[in-house]
């Protein structure tokens, strides 16, 4: 998602959450649960007593329910990231609803409740996505900070990108998947250190 869309999104799509009015910032992790990357993230957040929000893929939740349970047990928020992680852009509303509802059911079976937040795969959405989210009673969540951690960028580039773009209430996009399983343990602590040096606190997304 381009910087221009992130900046103009709140004006053209006010029903979508791009940033909150909280003084804290919100760490979000897409594409889990992953048996390696997600555990690395949870270990770091646990040591620092930080709560985050994980947008989980339904099919992967089926494969790794123990990871989903640990996310919930450690006090993090869980969001819906569709069942198959395929782009929903220009797909029929019925298919988009199905992707959301299947994931809701899986997560409810694992942790006992359905998520209220939905983030479409790759951040791609259209009118049908907005309608599907409304029909399934989800708040559609995007982000305003994207350091492109999946591109295997140098740690310092990720740190500077996050630090220069984060404001109070920012929703920061990270990934806990196969693309970051070897790097998330390297860049996450330096990012958190820099943000804490600037006086930011962290909280999970909540209603």
Image (tube, rainbow, N blue to C red):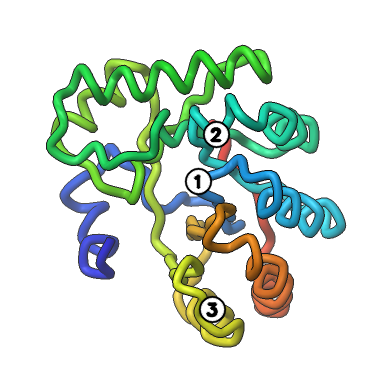
Q: Is 138 on the left-hand or right-hand side of 168?
A: left
Q: Residue at x 67, y 56 (%)?
A: 202
- Decide: is 10 above or below 102: below
Residue density around tag 1, few if under 14, some if 14–19, many if 20 or more, within 10 Å: many
The residue indicated by pointer 2 is: 60
The disc, 2 or 3, on the residue closer to the chain's N-terminal end is 2
**Dot 1 lies on which element?**
strand
Q: Which residue is mark 3?
A: 158
Q: Earlier in the sequence, mark 3 or mark 1?
A: 1
What kind of element bears circle 2?
Answer: helix
Label drawn at residue 148 = none
Give the position of the N terminus as an image quadrant.
bottom left
For residue 38, above or below residue 2 = above
Which image quadrant for residue 98? top left
Which quadrant holds residue 191?
bottom right
Q: Nearer the viewer, mark 2 or mark 3?
A: 2
Can residue 188 be seen from the camera position used here? yes
Q: CA distance from mark 2 to mark 3?
A: 26 Å
Q: How far, Cα to Cα, is label 2 from label 1? A: 8 Å
Q: Which mark is residue 31?
A: 1
**Mark 3–mark 1 CB contact (< 8 Å):** no
The percent coordinates of residue 24 (x first, y second) are 61, 57
Task: Name the residue at 48% across, 80% down.
Answer: 161
Upstream in the sequence, badge 2 or badge 1? 1
Image coords of residue 19 (percent x, y):
42, 53
Give neighbour class at mark 3: few <14, some 14-19, many 20+ (Cα, 10 Å).
some
Q: Residue 142, how many percent across, how many down? A: 37, 48
Q: Is residue 188 above or below residue 177?
A: below
Rounded to the nearest angstrom, the CA distance separating label 3 from label 1 is: 19 Å
Do labels 2 and 1 touch, CB within 8 Å?
A: yes
């Amino acid at each position: 998602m381009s910087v221009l869309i992130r900046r103009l999104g709140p004006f053209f799509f006010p029903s979508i959450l791009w940033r909150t009015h909280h003084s804290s910032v919100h760490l979000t992790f897409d594409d889990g649960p992953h048996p390696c990357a997600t555990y690395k993230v949870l270990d770091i957040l646990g040591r620092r007593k930080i709560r985050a929000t994980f947008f989980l893929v339904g099919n992967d939740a089926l494969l790794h329910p123990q990871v989903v349970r640990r996310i919930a047990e450690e006090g993090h928020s869980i969001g819906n990231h569709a069942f198959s992680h395929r782009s929903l852009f220009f797909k029929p509303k019925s298919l988009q609803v199905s992707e959301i509802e299947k994931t809701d059911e899986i997560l409810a079976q694992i942790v006992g409740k359905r998520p209220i937040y939905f983030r479409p795969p790759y951040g791609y959405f259209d009118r049908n996505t907005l309608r599907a989210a409304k029909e399934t009673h989800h708040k559609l969540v995007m982000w305003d900070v994207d350091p492109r951690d999946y591109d295997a960028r140098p740690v310092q580039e990720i740190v500077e990108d996050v630090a220069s773009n984060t404001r109070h209430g920012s929703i920061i996009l990270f990934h806990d998947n196969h693309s970051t399983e070897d790097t998330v343990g390297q860049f996450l602590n330096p990012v958190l250190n820099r943000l804490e040096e600037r006086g930011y606190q962290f909280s999970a997304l909540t209603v």
